[in-house]
Image: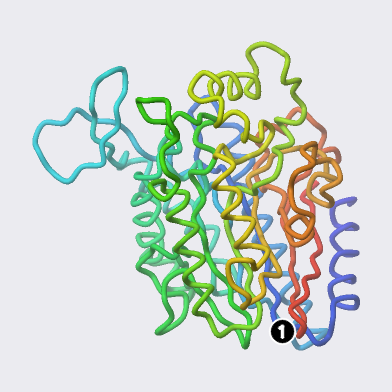
């Protein structure tokens, strides 16, 4: 009864408080974690059920908008962590070929789909999504859609979305499921470049930063000589350059970036004492100092990004429009967090690091996860899981309402 009462209030708020002159409305859900290790089977089942509930809630919201405002949701953003990385397995390399390889315990293996898990996963997602009344889903990858957060394993994410689009249930429902990355081959709109979606003078861009956590290690940024690798040789820089180039040539007035991992402090990290031996923050700092003092000096120990300061500076210049003047970036939409406190998603006041730019924080909107991961020990009313409904008005300004599952 409590869930229904809260949801009724949300519907009323959306119907009567949202700007009538909205240009775009969309829903965002994130961090499904439907596919996990066998030891997390119960967690996966709960998350699967709650993804179904989330889709139904979005349907209800869209229906209310249509009835009361003659409006609707333009699309749904799914900002990563379906759990595709758990649908893969390692096999010995028996012959030469174009394999994606992974080194483990000094040996090289090829990475392949676990066929049984892969097909079962497609059926699970298709069964839930076929009921969606919002027909366009823009999907960006998360770190758990990669294999052990390795960027070169992203083709499996692309394959999964393409194969999911071809499922009979999805075709029958008239859904468009889009691999929404600038590097993808799918188009969100006919004739539009991959990873771009335009409504009037608003540009939405899908940016892949699924690998920015880097398993909490900075070793990839340091060469054998203990010198920092030039940033223009890193995947992180190349991805930002791609995003920058797309935005520079756009004729849109305002831009909005969709990605998975926000640059700010991870609430899990903030809850740790960096002086405590053995925790993630301590290990990250100790490793960085051992590799390169210069790298450690510029490291933000609590951040969800494990990247050098130089990468952050490129991002800051881009997002604050120092790199280019138009379109004006007015919204950043991410996910990734699993904190049980609702305030984590409602405000940035809890952030510990003081060096983040205020004009970036004010345009950052982090959706709560669907998954029960790290929250199952709390009662439903003390969990922070759900999604958000976003409205962008004719001035490009963002209003959002979070809906909770608890």
Image coordinates of residue 191 in percent, x first then y, are 40, 84
Q: Residue at x 64, y 49 (%)?
A: 262
User: Which of the 4 quarters of the picture holds residue 230?
Assistant: top left
The colour scheme applied to this rendered structure is rainbow
Q: Work out whether 294 lies above or below 62.
A: above
Q: How many neighbours does mark 1 have within 10 angstroms: few (below 14), some (14-19), or many (20 or more)?
A: some
Regarding mark 1 in the picture, which secondary structure is present there? strand
Residue situated furthest left in the rendering: 95
Residue at the spot 66% in from the left edge and 60% down from the top edge: 333
Query: Residue 383 location, x and y as percent?
Result: 80, 39
Question: Position of 304 compared to 148: left or right?
Answer: right
Q: Which residue is mark 1?
A: 23
**Which one is nearer the viewer's eye here, 45 or 201?**
201
Position in image of residue 270 (x %, y %): 76, 31
With 317 as the anchor, is 210 left or right in this view? left
In the rendered image, the vertical position of residue 56 relative to residue 292, given as above or below: below
């Amino acid at each position: 009864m409590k869930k229904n009462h809260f949801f009724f209030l949300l519907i009323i708020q959306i119907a009567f408080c949202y700007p009538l002159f909205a240009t775009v409305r969309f829903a965002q859900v994130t961090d499904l974690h439907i596919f996990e290790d066998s030891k997390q089977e119960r967690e996966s089942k709960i998350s699967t059920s709650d993804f179904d509930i989330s889709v139904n809630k979005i349907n209800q919201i869209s229906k209310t908008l249509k009835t009361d405002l003659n409006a609707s949701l333009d699309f749904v953003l799914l900002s990563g962590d379906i759990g595709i990385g758990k649908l893969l397995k390692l096999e010995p390399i028996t012959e030469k070929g174009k394999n994606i390889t992974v080194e483990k315990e000094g040996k090289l293996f090829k990475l392949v789909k676990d066929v049984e898990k892969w097909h079962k996963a497609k059926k699970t997602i298709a069964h839930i999504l076929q009921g969606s009344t919002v027909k366009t889903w823009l999907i960006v990858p998360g770190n758990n859609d990669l294999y052990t957060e390795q960027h070169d394993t992203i083709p499996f994410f692309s394959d999964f979305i393409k194969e999911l689009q071809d499922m009979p249930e999805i075709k029958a429902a008239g859904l468009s499921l889009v691999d929404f990355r600038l590097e993808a081959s799918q188009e969100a709109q006919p004739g539009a470049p991959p990873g771009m979606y335009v409504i009037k003078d608003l540009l939405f861009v899908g940016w892949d930063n699924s690998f920015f956590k880097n398993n909490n290690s900075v070793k990839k940024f340091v060469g054998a000589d203990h010198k920092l690798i030039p940033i223009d040789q890193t995947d992180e820089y190349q991805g930002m350059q791609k995003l920058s180039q797309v935005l520079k040539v756009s004729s849109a007035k305002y831009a909005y970036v969709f990605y998975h991992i926000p640059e700010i402090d991870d609430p899990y990290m903030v809850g740790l004492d960096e002086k405590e031996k053995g925790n993630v923050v301590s290990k990250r700092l100790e490793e960085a100092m051992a590799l390169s003092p210069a790298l450690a000096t510029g490291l933000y120990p609590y951040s969800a990004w494990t990247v050098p300061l130089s990468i952050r500076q490129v991002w800051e210049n881009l997002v604050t429009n120092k790199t280019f003047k138009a379109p004006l970036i007015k919204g950043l939409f991410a996910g990734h967090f699993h904190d049980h406190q609702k305030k984590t998603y409602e405000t940035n006041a809890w952030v510990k690091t003081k060096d983040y730019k205020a004009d970036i924080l004010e345009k950052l909107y982090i959706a709560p996860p669907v998954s029960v991961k790290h929250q199952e020990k709390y009662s439903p009313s003390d969990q922070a899981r759900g999604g958000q409904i976003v409205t962008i008005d004719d001035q490009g300004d963002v209003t959002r309402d979070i809906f909770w599952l608890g």
